[in-house]
Image (cartoon, rainbow, N blue to C red):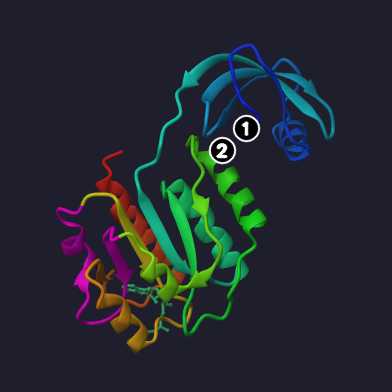
């Protein structure tokens, strides 16, 4: 379970009502059962469930199992998609180890804002499930050009189903993290928008093969390749 409070060996820490529900009703755990708890600042600890009621739980912390660890710097810049697809993207991107998610609006965007509380909860749940000790930072939605204008020059590969785009295998060859992956909305980028992006020296258009993928598929396919570059 992810706990916001400072964690240390011997401490007793309260969980949230949602965690009490998950432990008791979903996982059928009870007082005295062994679990692990973690947060980004303090790492991961062995623990036992000290109290478990319907909407309350507390953990008695034992030995620290893992020190805090930063994820490799792999960033996702992605057009805001319809709710279910975007939830899925946040979950999968967290599993694939992204350090930050920058939702962007583009000329063909249908959705132009995100619910940060809801997406942060999804990222936290995914981090718990895949046992990573960090949670990606999720930014508020901003126009694509604004994100590109303030980008720090880290290489950014843009998923483009254009004929002149480099196959991802070539683009990824020899590339090292930090790196970003940019994917367009359901209706794709407008041509001029893509030209504007690729005029910047740090942006390269990259293709994932000849088929038109759903945006969420393009997110996961590209991140899988780039994540392999991190070597862990
Ligand atoms: N309506 C667009 C069209 O038919 O040209 C398709 C957009 S696609 C559903 C959504 C996004 O996924 C695109 O903006 C692009 O970023 C990415 N994408 C889809 N297929 C791709 C491919 N084969 N290579 C690279 N990126 C792709």
* Residue 210 in sight from this viewpoint: no
Q: Position of residue 39 (x, y in %)?
A: 56, 32
Horizontal relation, residue 59 to residue 231: left or right:
right
**Quadrant hosting residue 5:** top right
Locate the N terminus and report the quarter of the image it occupies.
top right
Going from N to C along the chain, the mark reached first, 1 or 2, is: 1
Q: Position of residue 139 (x, y in %)?
A: 53, 59
Q: Position of residue 228 (x, y in %)?
A: 28, 47
**Quadrant hosting residue 210:** bottom left
Residue at the (52%, 31%) spot, across then down: 41
Q: Position of residue 220 (x, y in %)?
A: 40, 59
Q: Disc 2 on helix, strand or loop? A: helix
**Residue 38, magenta (yes or no):** no
* Residue 205 in sight from this viewpoint: yes
Q: Which residues are magenta?
A: 153-175
* Residue 128 disc label: 2
Ligand 1 picture quarter: bottom left
Residue at the (72%, 15%) spot, across then down: 32
Q: CA distance from mark 1 to mark 2?
A: 6 Å
Locate the C terminus and report the quarter of the image it occupies.
top left
**Residue 166, magenta (yes or no):** yes
Residue that label 1 marks: 1
Q: Residue furthest right?
A: 54
Do the numbered discs 1 and 2 sit on residues whose CB atoms are within 8 Å? yes
Residue at the (41%, 75%) spot, across then down: 145
Tell how many labels: 2
Q: Residues within 10 Å of mark 2 (few under 14, many from 20)?
A: many
Residue at the (26%, 73%) spot, across then down: 200
């Amino acid at each position: 379970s992810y706990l916001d409070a400072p964690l240390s060996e011997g401490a007793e820490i309260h969980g949230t009502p949602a965690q009490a529900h998950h432990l008791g009703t979903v996982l059928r755990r009870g007082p005295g059962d062994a679990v692990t708890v973690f947060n980004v600042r303090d790492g991961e600890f062995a623990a036992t469930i000290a109290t478990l009621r319907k909407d309350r739980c507390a953990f008695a912390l034992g030995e620290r199992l893992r020190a805090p660890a930063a994820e490799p710097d792999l960033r996702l810049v992605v057009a805001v998609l319809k709710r279910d697809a975007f939830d899925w993207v946040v979950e999968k991107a967290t599993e694939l180890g992204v350090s930050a998610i920058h939702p962007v609006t583009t000329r063909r965007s249908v959705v132009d804002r995100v619910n940060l509380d809801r997406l942060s909860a999804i990222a936290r749940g995914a981090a718990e499930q895949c046992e990573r000790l960090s949670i990606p930072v999720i930014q508020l939605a901003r126009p694509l050009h604004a994100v590109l204008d303030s980008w720090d020059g880290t290489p950014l590969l843009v998923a483009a189903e254009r004929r002149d785009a480099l196959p991802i295998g070539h683009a990824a060859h020899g590339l090292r993290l930090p790196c970003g992956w940019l994917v367009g909305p359901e209706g794709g980028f407008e041509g001029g928008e893509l030209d504007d992006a690729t005029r910047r020296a740090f942006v390269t258009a990259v293709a994932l093969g000849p088929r038109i993928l759903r945006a969420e598929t393009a997110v996961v396919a590209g991140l899988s390749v780039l994540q392999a570059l991190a070597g862990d």
